[in-house]
Amino acid sequence: MRRTMVAGNWKMHGTRASVAELIDGLRELALPGGVDVAVFPPLLHVSQVVDGLKGTSIQVGAQNAAVQSGQGALTGEVAPSQLIDAGCAYVLVGHSERRQLMGESDQMLNRKFAAAQASGLIPVFCVGETLEQRELGKTIEVVSRQLDSIIGELGVDAFASAVIAYEPVWAIGTGLTATPQQAQDVHAAIRAQLAEKNSEVAQGVRLLYGGSVKAANAVELFGMPDIDGGLIGGASLNADEFGAICRAAGN
Ligand code: 13P
């Protein structure tokens, strides 16, 4: 059985003081068993969060990592091996904000995915369509192409130790959420695409939904058969709200 997962992407939010407060709030949460919980602070705050969450079951991930696993001359980047050393377990790869605003190409994402795995980090690979693409009926085509880029380069087995997050771009930070059925349809298509190559990998991989998830809509979303949890943005900056979403995943 797939374990449910709830991940909080803090994006570019926080100061040392506000992060300390959030850590305090997270430490007080009564988290359900059977749910893997992880937070993804800005790189600057990773060590503070790893130290602050010691003794809890909450794991820490990074929002980005370099295209090579080992250290080297790559100004401004952080190597996956350095993230492992700092106590990270996961890294986001292919978030739409990085694809669109930082110009990250499929080829670059393939390298980041492979480098992360080479160091022992679990990539959380993000896919999703824009509003225009959805309105043109291209949702499945777009998501399938994003997945194929990894499968073509690294093989379907790369998803045996990875997580996939479906985040429709139009639902991110907009307050618009995909309906549970809209999300389920895409998740089912993702699983079917992987199953064509390897049914064991397809059945085992966790598919998270992301895009304006809140405690109020989490139960319905997480109740769908192919939705194994969520990647939470804005709502993960509030410990109580995030805790409520984690409990929804435990139901
Ligand atoms: P919001 O939950 O703020 O819509 O963000 C979703 C997201 O991008 C998580 O990675």
Image (cartoon, grey):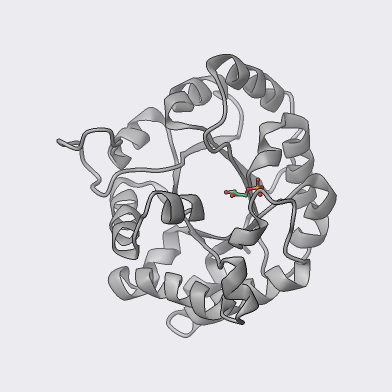
Q: Does residue 137 lie above or below 17 as drawn? A: below
Number of marks present in the image shown: 0
Question: x%, y% of residue 181?
Answer: 76, 73
Residue lying furthest left in this view? 73
Question: x%, y% of residue 232?
Answer: 65, 46
Is 28 displayed left or right of 152 in the figure?
right
Residue lying furthest top in this view? 17
Q: Identify the residue at image location x=44%, y=23%.
A: 47
Q: Quadrant of the N terminus?
A: bottom right
Residue lying furthest bottom in this view? 196
Question: x%, y% of residue 156?
Answer: 39, 73
Q: Does residue 74 lie above or below 164 as drawn? A: above
Would residue 208 be seen by someone viewing this image from the given angle? Answer: no
Q: Identify the residue at image location x=29%, y=63%.
A: 107
Question: x%, y% of residue 146?
Answer: 44, 70
Tell me which corner region of the image, top left, top right, bottom left or bottom right, holds residue 31. Answer: top right
Q: Nearer the viewer, residue 130 or 158?
A: 130
Q: Does residue 228 lie above or below 74 as drawn? A: below
Tell me which corner region of the image, top left, top right, bottom left or bottom right, holds residue 131. Answer: bottom right
Q: Does residue 110 lie above or below 115 as drawn? A: below
Would residue 193 be seen by someone viewing this image from the given angle? Answer: yes
Q: Identify the residue at image location x=36%, y=35%.
A: 83
Q: Identify the residue at image location x=44%, y=71%.
A: 147
